Amino acid sequence: MTVSIRPLHPLFCGEVSGIDMTRDLTSEEVAAVEAGMDEYAVLVFHKQNITDQQQQSFTRNFGELELPGAVSNITKDHERRLDPLMADVSNLNRDHKPFDRNDRARMFNLGNRLWHSDSSFRAVPAKYSLLSGRIVPAAGGNTEFADMRAAYDALDDKTKAEIEDLVCEHSLLYSRGQLGFEGLSEEEQANFKPVRQRLVRTHPVTGRKSLYLSAHGGTIVGWQTPEARVFLKDLNEHATQREFVHRHQWRQYDLVVWDNRQVMHRVRAFNDTAEIRDMRRTTVAGEEMTVEQAA
Ligand code: OGA
Ligand code: MN
């Protein structure tokens, strides 16, 4: 089948037809998807009724899988609902029931409601995220994407010069700290040790620059924290204004792929203590650090 892509937004996001993820892809199909990702940064595939294995195989076309694990969540191995290669982004516990309102995992997962880039808290942050909607709620639970290339392009020259070489520190401690999430164990805090990321990234294929923002970003190296926080808050506000944002309204068996190097995303509210939203993510590991880490 031939792959074609229909734009969904004036700046980014495309809808792909001609791909069936239950089968192996040809190298031409993989190349077409990759080229689409470089251009659109977010691609939507409909009607992909896939198993976890098929999702993993499709993901491997684009690089190594990033393992979820203890550096990215507070869920312990014995509490996991899914196999270790799947990031469980659902609202479900091991018994496939929605988390209770006060469940600690639910509180932690509320962090996905903040604009972020996946795994920006890892020294080598993620390349693509692939999110499969296995069961979607009747209302709400949309995922929004913001184009960080367009956000960068729209900055004035003075700001571009000011931020060109800035380095931020990212950690789950910062994103969860914004929510007032407390009670992390010493082990969890050690897992969430901050890492350094450039604030301006250059895409390795297209050469386009983008703002590398994320709720996990909490300090700027060499700056006092309050000044860094308000500066980042202003940049985030600029970068997520309506013209840079596309909203994806989920249908069952949609699979959405986004390039974490070029966009931020967030999930919106739904009736999550009553309805089921079974979302499963695989992640393509990044290939390099954005900047050297502190000694
Ligand atoms: C993610 C995430 C958003 C959503 O999978 O990384 O932030 O819509 N999910 O569930
Ligand atoms: Mn995410």
Image: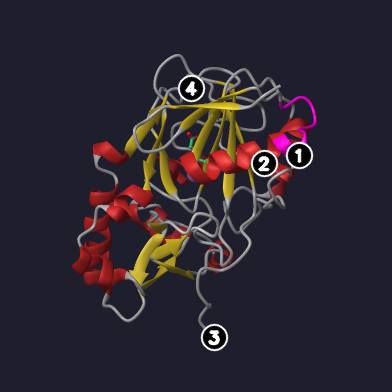
Within 8 Å of ligand 1, the CB of disc 4?
Answer: yes
The reply to whether the C-beta atoms of the residues labelled 2 and 1 are less than 8 Å apart is yes
Crowding near the residue tagged with mark 3, few <14, some 14–19, many ≥20 C-alpha atoms within 10 Å: few
Specify the amino acid type for callout 4: Trp
**Which label sits on residue 31?**
2
Instruction: Classify residue 211 by image quadrant.
Output: bottom left
Crowding near the residue tagged with mark 4, few <14, some 14–19, many ≥20 C-alpha atoms within 10 Å: many
Counting residues from the start of the chain, the first of labels 4 and 1 encountered is: 1
Within 8 Å of ligand 2, the CB of disc 3?
Answer: no
Residue located 41% across and 22% down the image: 271
**Which label sits on residue 27?**
1
Q: Which residues are magenta?
A: 21-28
Rendered location of residue 48, percent (x, y): 65, 22
Rendered location of residue 284, percent (x, y): 64, 49
Residue linked to disc 4? 250
Residue 6 is at least partly visible in this image? yes
